[in-house]
Amino acid sequence: MVKRDAADSSPAPRRLIGYARVSNDDQVHDAQMDELRAAGCERIFQEHGSGASRARPVLTRVLGDLIAGDVLVVVRLDRLARSVSHLLQVIEDLDERGVHFRSIRDPIDTSTPQGILSLQVLGAVAQLERALISERTKAGIKAAKARGKLPGNPGLRERRPEAIQAVSKAREKLYLDELISSAQTWLPTVRQLRPQHSWDNVVRVLKRRGHNWTVERLRRAVHRMVREKLAEPELLARSPRRAPEDHLMKLVAAIAIADPGLSLRDIAGQLDQMGERPARGGRKWQPSSVRHLLDEAHRFGLIRH
């Protein structure tokens, strides 16, 4: 973690951001809105859709806009996630970005020790859920083989055009669903850095956060999100040859958030490897230039203590 002066260590005020989801067959949402307002939410976002659906464009945007120090608030856990695994995935990503999560009617508040304990219990439940699904799947395949049935799709084995087309559509839908469900883990970084920085540099930052993107896969994913109107077309614009200082500030902030253990000199070395030129001139980055950009990032709220 880059060390800061004591004078800069005062915590920024938290924003409470509410999210309400209303099922398609239940259009009554006033109760959720009232509870979120009573909890002190500054802004409340509403979405209509089934709890099982992966397509949650409003939630994707909300998660992408949250910054360190914010608190995402829901009335119940089922308003946010479609499964325990999905819930833990969302909360883990929020935690990595310094964002807290609170459910009004459930004992989940990641800013408290009790809430963390409840989360650990949910993690054990999710592990059991995955084990049971795997066990049922293996048992089903074994039973089918015992009855002499071949696994897989008969239409595909016979190369029927309608079966091939159906599988192609299903794969495309699955790809989009996976993009939407995982967008909160990578799209905020893309929005922070594109188009001012190259795709190579964006991939480098994402890999420091544990993602396994390639440039081609990331560009394809962003193209698809733009086509579905879930991301801004500007993300696909050509990056300039030299990024202005405010965009270098965002890049330095993204590097520091992705790997908090880096020193100022380490970050300078990363910028040199990326081919980014110092905004104030010179051929190599100096720790003092990195510190200046980090100070600006703290001032603008890109990084919270």
Image (cartoon, grey):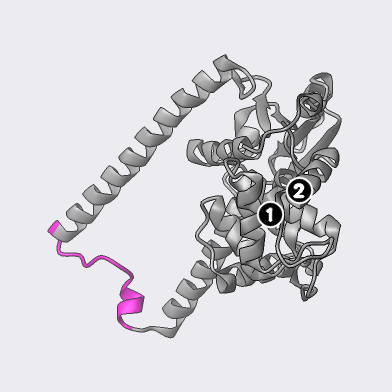
Q: Residue at x 76, y 24 (%)?
A: 6
CB under 8 Å between discs 1 and 2: no
- Given residues 294 and 117, the one toward you in this image is 294
Q: Nearer the viewer, mark 1 or mark 2?
A: 2
Helix, strand or loop for disc 1: helix
* Residue 199 placement: quadrant: bottom right
- Within-10-Å neighbours for mark 2: few <14, some 14–19, many 20+: few
Q: Magenta span covers which residues? A: 146-158
- Queried whether the magenta region covers residue 1, the answer comes back as no
Quarter of the picture holding the C terminus: top right
- Given residues 293 and 119, the one toward you in this image is 293
Name the spot of residue 243 as percent of width and height, x first. Answer: 80, 66
Task: Name the residue furthest top.
Answer: 114
Q: Height in image: 282 above or below 37? A: below
Q: Is residue 178 left or right of residue 8?
A: left
Name the spot of residue 285 as percent of width and height, x first. Answer: 71, 59
**Which badge, 1 or 2, is on the more N-terminal residue?**
1
Q: Height in image: 256 above or below 200? A: above
Distance from disc 1 to disc 2, alpha carbons, whole Å, reads 24 Å
* Residue 222 placement: quadrant: bottom right
- Name the amino acid type tagged 2: Ser
Q: Is residue 134 left or right of residue 230?
A: left
Q: Is residue 168 left or right of residue 233?
A: left
Q: Which residue is mark 1?
A: 189
Name the spot of residue 30 as percent of width and height, x first. Answer: 82, 29
